[in-house]
Amino acid sequence: MALAAILLFAGISHLTFAREEFQAQVPDWFPLDEDLVVIGSGIVELTLGGSLLLARGRRRIQVGWIVAAFFVVIFPGNIAQYLERTDAFGLDTDAKRLARLPGQVGLVLLALWSTGAWRAWRSRRR
């Protein structure tokens, strides 16, 4: 439930009050319009957050893998924010931007753990 709340909040903030902050995090090299990326990722986060709330059983495990994959896909943006020294969300020093990176790994692990995806994968390997 906490991960769903995080995703729903992030999705809402992408589409409303934090839109410009998120635009600043889109890497310079990314070939799409920054606002389009922010809107699209906000819609994806709302969809994933809602899916976490509604999915049960096997579907929840599938959603867990999808959420984890989403966190992996957006990770290059976090790396780019560090490398390009982009200030956003109070990440106004290299140390703060670098410290944020392990948090993304934590979100991937949380998605896999909280949905049972990791446990299901391990039990299939036995």
Image (spheres, rainbow, N blue to C red):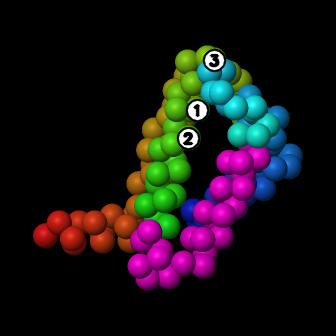
Q: Position of residue 99 (x, y in %)?
A: 51, 31
Marks 3 and 2, the one that precedes in the sequence: 2
* 10 Å crowding of disc 2: few (<14), some (14-19), many (20+): few
Q: Which residue is mark 3?
A: 85
Quarter-of-image position of residue 45: bottom right
Q: Position of residue 9 (x, y in %)?
A: 72, 57
Marks 1 and 3, the one that precedes in the sequence: 1
Give the residue type that dot 1 points to.
Answer: Gly
| Residue 83 in the figure: left or right of residue 16 | left
Asked if residue 89 shows in the view, the reply is: yes
Q: Which residue is mark 1?
A: 77
Q: Residue at x 69, y 61 (%)?
A: 46
Q: Residue at x 22, y 72 (%)?
A: 123
Distance of label 1 from label 2 (alpha carbons): 6 Å
Distance of label 3 from label 2 (alpha carbons): 17 Å
| Residue 47 in the figure: left or right of residue 114 | right
* Residue stretch rendered in magenta on the structure: 38-62
Q: Which image quarter holds the N terminus?
A: bottom right
Q: Position of residue 90 (x, y in %)?
A: 71, 31
Q: Which secondary structure type mostly characterizes the magenta part of the structure?
A: helix
Quarter-of-image position of residue 23: top right
Q: Is residue 90 above or below residue 29?
A: below
Q: Position of residue 7 (x, y in %)?
A: 64, 58
Q: Which image quarter holds the C terminus?
A: bottom left
Is 41 colored magenta in this rendering? Answer: yes
Q: Which residue is mark 2?
A: 74
